[in-house]
Amino acid sequence: MSEETGLGPTLRAWRDRLSPAAVGLPAGRKRRARGLRREELSELAGISVDYVIRLEQGRATRPSPQVVASLARALQLNREERDHLYRLAGLRPPSDRHIVDHIPPGMQRVLTRLGETPAAVFAADWRLIWWNRAWSAVLGDPSGIDPEDRNLVKAHFPVPGDCGRVGLWPVVLRDRESTGRAIVADLRRASAKYPDDPRLSALIERTLAGNARFAQLWREGAVAGHPEDRKTVIRPGVGEITLDCDVLTDTDTDLKVVIFTAEPGSEDESRLKLALVAGAVPSMTITQTEET
């Protein structure tokens, strides 16, 4: 790590940019420091001035998690900066310990601009929490499915008594095995980030006990995100529509935006447009082996 990107220079840069007024301190008449003095940061963070000096000079490079947390609060770091500080100190950034279902305003604005592109949002445990009209038109309106059953893990790895669905129409996966592995690997990643979330823990425990294939993949220990995929939706009144499925994950919330698109100029694009014109249609009976 270069002299300009290490822990010490980064702390100095953050200290220099923070004005005394921003932390409720009087500016005073004679200040050579552009931002906070080391003594002021020391007082705000509850650590010694000597230790602040050693950190900034690179003579101390492994502060404890408690010190890093105090510095992050004193320097008024945002989440990305806080996580960066932890990594510079050789520590794992703290995580939000419970799954987020709330869609941030910025993501909401992006979703509204997708127009007639089928899109949905899943939480970190793959529960479907939002979808647009185009999604309903192509896959069937999931609003009649109980919220706890709108889950891709339940749909892909059913256990006795499960009725997990994230849509109403049959979906044929290009590679069911790879998709299953990706779901399990992503769920394992979420389990480490949200160890205290009861909804996630219950889902994992129930599926481990009730689905042998899930248990086998879980024991393999893979950790990864869910990549893009290709799926064929069997849409009543339209026929088969083969679509590219892309998964965009928000790093702050682990919310996953799933988007379906068709190859431009293809027959699938024409069928997609027909499905959008037709809109949502009444539910049909789906067997448990079919999956969205």
Image: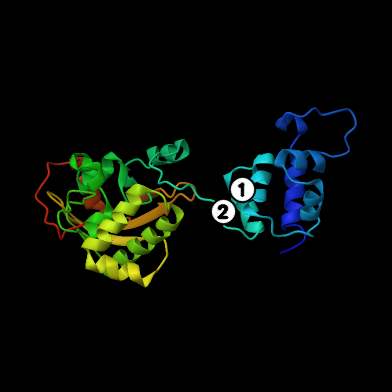
**Res 115 seen here:** yes
Q: State whether residue 243 appears in this view.
A: no
Residue 24 versus residue 258 in the image, above or below: above
Furthest residue in direction right, as rendered = 30
Q: Residue at x 66, y 57 (%)?
A: 88
Tell me the kind of residue under disc 1: Arg
Ranked by sequence position, the earlier of labels 2 and 1 is: 1
Number of the label disc, if any, that sits on residue 195:
none
Residue at (44% x, 41% y) in the render: 107
- Colour basis: rainbow
Picture residue at 74% right of the left edge, 45% below the top: 47
Circle 2: residue type: Pro
Picture quarter containing residue 154? bottom left
Q: Secondary structure at mark 2?
A: loop
Residue matched to label 2: 93
| Viewer-closest of 17 and 272 | 17
Image position of 18 with respect to 251: above or below: above
Left of 161 or right of it: where is 92?
A: right
* Distance (Cα) linking label 2 and label 1: 8 Å
Q: Left or right of 30: which side holds 228?
A: left
Counting from the top left corner in percent of width and height, residue 264 is at: 33, 55
Q: Looking at the image, do the residues carrying marks 2 and 1 touch, with CB atoms under 8 Å apart? A: yes
Q: Residues within 10 Å of mark 2 (few under 14, many from 20)?
A: some
Residue to which mark 1 is pinned? 82
Coordinates of residue 173 in the picture (x, y in percent): 24, 63
Coordinates of residue 261 in the picture (x, y in percent):
32, 53
